[in-house]
Image: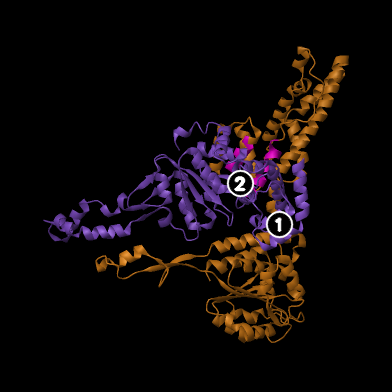
Chain colours: A orange, B purple
Amino acid sequence: MEQILKDFISALRSSGARISIPETIDAMNTVKLTGYHDREVFKDSLSAVLAKSFHEKEIFEECFYRFFSFDTFSENIGDSPESLAPEVMEEISPLSQMILSGNLGGLAASIREAAREVRITGIQFFTQKGLYIHRILRHIGLNGLNQDIKRLFQKDTLSSKQMAEKLEKGKDYLFENVKDFVEQQFALFSPSVTENLLEDYLKSIKLSNLEQRDFHRMHSIIQKMVKRLNDLHSRRRKTSKRGQLDFRKTLRNNISYQGLLFDIQWKKKKVDRPDIVALCDVSRSVETVARFLLLFLYSLNKSLARIRTFIFCSNLIEVSHIFDEYPVEDALVKLQSGIGLGIVLGRTDYGQAFRDFEESWSHLITKKTTVLILGDARNNYGDPQTGILKSMQERGKRLIWLNSEPRSFWGIGDSEMKKYLPYCHLARECNTVHHLERVVDSLLSLAL
Amino acid sequence: MNLIHDKKFASIENVQLGLKNAEYICSKKIATTVYLAYHLEKPILVEGPAGVGKTELAKTAAAFLGVSLIRMQCYEGLDESKALYEWKYGKQLLYTQMLKDKLNDVLKGAKGLSASIDKLHQYNDIFFSLSFLEPRPLLKALQQKDGAVLLIDEIDKSDHEFEAFLLEILSDFQVSIPEIDTIHAETKPFVFLTSNNTRELSEALKRRCLHLYIPLPDPKLEREIIRIRVPGISEKLRIQLVSFIQQLRELDIKKIPSISETIDWARVLLLLHADKLSADLISETLHIILKFEGDIKIAEEHLYEMTRKAIKEAAI
């Protein structure tokens, strides 16, 4: 049973539940305590020890039913066991004996045993199913069974013919059951692999190639990321003029006054959170990427208190309120269509966008502000207005430019990236989630 | 945990029955987890929607075991001086002032500074001893001779640092006080942690606990809970009420009513001497189960059909 428990845990792991070694030991102890006789209790107690969140509980339920369902071996192989001549029994293989005597439990056990021998837990792709079925059948002694059938047919007596037919029938059942078993194991051990593959794939794929249906998954990846990064904010105690009484420090400072509380110290907890101004290009040239950059900004907007978001094409407008008011899908559609927002979706004009910003919102940039610009810097040969960018850089704490084009394209054609580059503290190519992740890491780890 | 409780924890059924006698109706799953936690000596992390009886479970367990309940409410900014122990600074100061004169006697005969210091060292850290220690909930729970139920409420509200700091207590039932020593539990307390899932808890913490998810109850269980908690209520009203609440939970509303709201509502209806539900009665008392203006509006739209269904269900 220990082995079965181990298999079950590895099935859980491959379905995405994180189970550590101490938890495995707990599971063993639990089973010792509660026993196997009551299925519900068995399930509940394992669930308490192994699945540690609502999400994991769901995985657990599914796995449990799949894993422990095999024991009901489907259908009966034949009639009740007949009295068999002992000399016949000695001639035939153990597998045939089990079929003839209707030993279902034995068959189930030997399939399981064979499955373990051929390492079914390694199954990854559906194309491997046939291979594993074949291996298991060979392992439980299909060859012996075939020979028995052949020999019994050759004997040409009535009873041996009957026996051969029965074996033939048993073979079909066996085949069916092994097939079911492999299907089940595939479902148990493989989906996670596919799941992980998919997630990895989504992370490294170009944002512009992502399809609509992956959108939700993508959203959750980004959210996970933002959440993790948000947790990293440094918290530090700071001496300040008001707040909580810092007793230790007060005592220490007042030793020199003979313990009289003369110089009182206060403390306050300070959380460093970034203050961000984001400008995002939504023109045609970055249309598909923009969708995901906006999605990213949306998540940022939800998790950071101090962020102002702007979008621009031919001119620039503020959209922070749209993010606050609408759910994610509506907000993105609204921003990309630009209807009723006062944005002109004509030729991209970085110069105009910078001028607009300078005119109305330049006061937003303080020495604590990080300016984040998302765009390809393709300005249709207009005036790039590098002067404004320079002043933004000088006044702000940091200026980060995320360009959707690879570095080798920068400065080619109407791209003004080379001209903007000197004024960026950080300029990165950003068109996959991996890129985004790295950028956000550097954004927050430096406690901007 | 003490051997004297072994009888109460002899089987899962015993636990379930014991909790029921303490007016807590629980599913077998909850009983199983409590049973395991006792025998494996592990804390239970209880999660679930607000108001399903997470805190109540800990209170009942204390009543069931017949030990005191020590409760610690977590909040942002909670630190060890509030949760574990603090030195009685005032007392220390006062004593130093009072004992000033005694110092002269002690130091009598010592020549030079180093000799005085040496002499002082002969007296152990008088001011950093147990008598100057103010125990806070965690330390208090460890010091109870007969064991205790320690409830760490809404752990998700506390900071990450605090969570890490809990690990020592949860796995080894001990705390280290640098000035004194490591203090071990006299009797291991029965620990419950509750969480509303406002943030993900760390893996390390989860690993040390058994996990229990309490979902909203099914109608049968909920009727049973109402029967025990609100004894005076009529059978018919009880069925109608639960049916209505269950329907309400399927609507798309912000705050789904949980068990505590059902109990409150049942009590209110009892006070109003109602013996059956009617649409008017419900619309008058709807604000007890629903806490948002928008939710009440949505519920009112479906009020008549839901009431009809609830009455029909009770009639069967």
Mark 1 vs mark 2: same chain? yes
Structural distance between the alpha carbons of marks 1 and 2? 32 Å
Q: Marks 2 and 1: in contact by CB < 8 Å?
A: no
Q: Quadrant of residue B282?
A: bottom right
Q: Which residues are magenta?
A: A41-68
Q: Is residue A31 left or right of residue A350?
A: left
Determine the image quadrant of residue A315: bottom right
Q: At numbered mark 1, what does the secondary structure look like: helix, strand or loop?
A: helix
Amino acid at circle 1: Ser
State left or right for residue B134 relative to residue B188: left
Residue A109 visible in this rendered orientation of the protein: yes
Point out residue A223 in the picture as x, y percentages from the top left corner: 64, 61
The image quadrant of residue B34 is top right
Residue B124, position as x, y percentages in the image: 24, 51
Which chain is mark 2 on?
A: B
Q: Amino acid at mark 2?
A: Tyr
Pointer 2: what residue?
Answer: B213
In the image, is residue A35 part of the stretch drawn in magenta? no
Depth order, front residue of B99/B51: B51
Q: Residue A137, how many percent across, how many down?
A: 76, 32
Q: Nearer the viewer, residue A154 or B111?
A: B111
Quick one: SS at disc 2?
A: strand
Q: Is residue B42 above or below residue A147?
A: below
Please state the horizontal and vertical placement of residue B247, each as a whole percent of the image.
Answer: 73, 50
Residue at 62%, 40% in the rendered image: B27
Tell me the residue at 58%/70% (across/down).
Answer: A305
Q: From the viewer's perspective, is residue B31 above or below residue A396? A: above
Name the disc covering residue A43, or none.
none
Residue at label 1?
B283
Nearest the viewer among B100 and B169 is B100
Q: Is residue B104 left or right of residue B178?
A: left
